[in-house]
Image (cartoon, grey):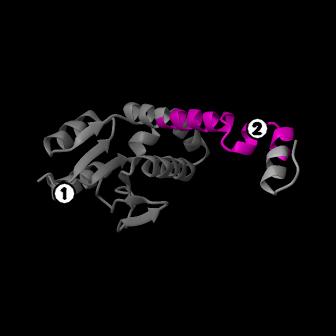
Amino acid sequence: MIEKYEEYLFVDGYNIINAWPELMEAKSVSLETARDKLVDIMSDYAAQTGLKIVVVFDAHHVEGSRGARYLINGVEVVFTKEGETADAYIERTVDTMGKRYRVKVATSDWVEQQIIMGRGAVRISARELRNEIMALVEKRRKKEEIQKLEKNTLEERVDKSTWRLLLERLKGGKGA
């Protein structure tokens, strides 16, 4: 019997922010703006793919941070506790998940990629994740364009005079 897996994507938040041009631009406004934009992008991606996404941000340099977890638009957002890096949190969590789930980790940190692959997860670089997301956005945009161009109802397909004639006949009127 084939076991049904749940799929997870762990995102090393600051690693991705520092790798994507649009997030670096948002970071120039504020770090909070960049985090919010990343979470928005991941929320949309989760909705399109069905992945369970966990975005992890380092708070290990924040004195007294006890860590925090939030659910924002379907994405779990984790701020690590003082003294814990995002890498350490991801590694520990991937370890506890074992082989029960399919897990991907998005990071461009080479050492982190090696560690998580050794623990059974699949790695995806920041660039690969961005390309995947951009391809999905483009596919959705093209689909929406095609839907706008296609005529979806009989009324849209038939010229107005023929449509009036058809309605007259359906109402039992005299049509030509």
Mark 2, other Cα within 10 Å: few <14 / some 14–19 / many ≥20: few
Label 1 and label 2: CA atoms lie apart by: 57 Å
Secondary structure mostly seen in magenta is helix
Residue at point 21% right, 53% down?
Answer: 101
Tell me where residue 127 appears, x and y as whole percent.
40, 31
Residue at point 28% right, 51% down?
Answer: 7
Drawn side of residue 16 relative to residue 91, left or right: right
Residue at point 58% right, 42% down?
Answer: 26
Tell me where residue 130 appears, x and y as whole percent.
44, 35
Mark 1, other Cα within 10 Å: few <14 / some 14–19 / many ≥20: some
Seen from the viewer's position, the closer of residues 37 and 144 is 144
Q: Is residue 143 on the magenta stretch?
A: yes
Instruction: Name the amino acid, label 1.
Output: Met
Instruction: Name the amino acid, label 2.
Output: Val
Tell me where residue 96 appears, x and y as whole percent.
17, 59
- 21 up-or-down from 8: above or below: above
Which residue, given by chain and number where applicable, does mark 1 sit on? 97
Seen from the viewer's position, the closer of residues 124 and 45 is 45
The residue tagged with tag 2: helix, strand or loop?
Answer: loop
Tell me where residue 88 appears, x and y as whole percent.
24, 52
Q: Which residues are magenta?
A: 136-164
Which residue, given by chain and number where applicable, does mark 2 sit on? 158
Position of the C terminus, as image quadrant, is: top right
